[in-house]
Image (spheres, rainbow, N blue to C red):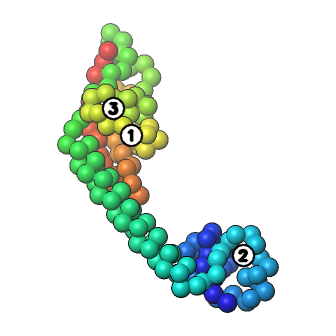
Amino acid sequence: MQVILIQDVKSLGKKGDVVKVSEGYARNFILPKKLGIEATSANLNDVKLKKANDDKVAKENLEKASALGKKIEEGQVTVGIKAGSNGHSFGSVSNKEIAEALKSQMGIEVDRKKIVIPSPIKSEGRFEVRVKLHAKVAAKLAVVVEAK
């Protein structure tokens, strides 16, 4: 019997796969636990249409992330850091501060967890940080740090 998997099943296949299993396994395990549905022509067509739609949505998300990445790489943000009179800084610039500066200065909202700072920023100057926008897209953001 052929079954279309609705969820990932260990040692059988991933969601959306059409697999051939014994009739007893399908009737007693896969179908009652809603792990899969019977592979009829209508169900196969539905899965094919859903997969095509998912591919289209994934492509659109990749294009949006690429466009946003170009916009981020063209600009820069300025962040302040507390510093003493001798130029010694107190603390460091966090990814939360960079995300807030990105939102206020460029109007781009990015989750702070997607901003990767290679090493702690503890001094004034110009630094580059990576912003992960998509699994395949990462942009470099110029961050200018000034003393407050």
Q: Nearer the viewer, mark 2 or mark 3?
A: 2
Above or below, 99 against 116 in this view is above
Above or below, 7 against 38 in this view is above
Residue 104 in the image: x percent, y percent?
Answer: 31, 27
| CA–CA distance in space, label 1 to label 3 | 8 Å
Q: Nearer the viewer, mark 1 or mark 2?
A: 2
The C terminus is located in which quarter?
top left
Q: Which mark is residue 110?
A: 1
Of 8 and 35, nearer the camera is 35
In the image, what residue type sits under mark 2?
Leu
Residue 145 in the image: x percent, y percent?
Answer: 30, 27
Label 2: which residue?
A: 31
Residue 32 in the image: x percent, y percent?
Answer: 76, 72
Query: Which residue is drawn at the image coordinates 41% and 58% (left, top)?
Result: 135
Res 71 → quadrant: top left
In the image, what residue type sits under mark 1?
Val
Label pair 1/3, CB-CB below 8 angstroms: yes
Label 3: which residue?
A: 103
Of labels 2 and 3, earlier in sequence is: 2
Above or below, 29 against 61 in this view is below
Q: Residues within 10 Å of mark 1 (few under 14, many from 20)?
A: some
Of 22 and 103, nearer the camera is 22
- Under tag 3, what secondary structure? helix
- Under tag 2, what secondary structure? loop
Query: Which residue is drawn at the image coordinates 39% and 40% (left, top)?
Result: 110
Of 18 and 80, nearer the camera is 18
Q: Is residue 121 visible?
A: no
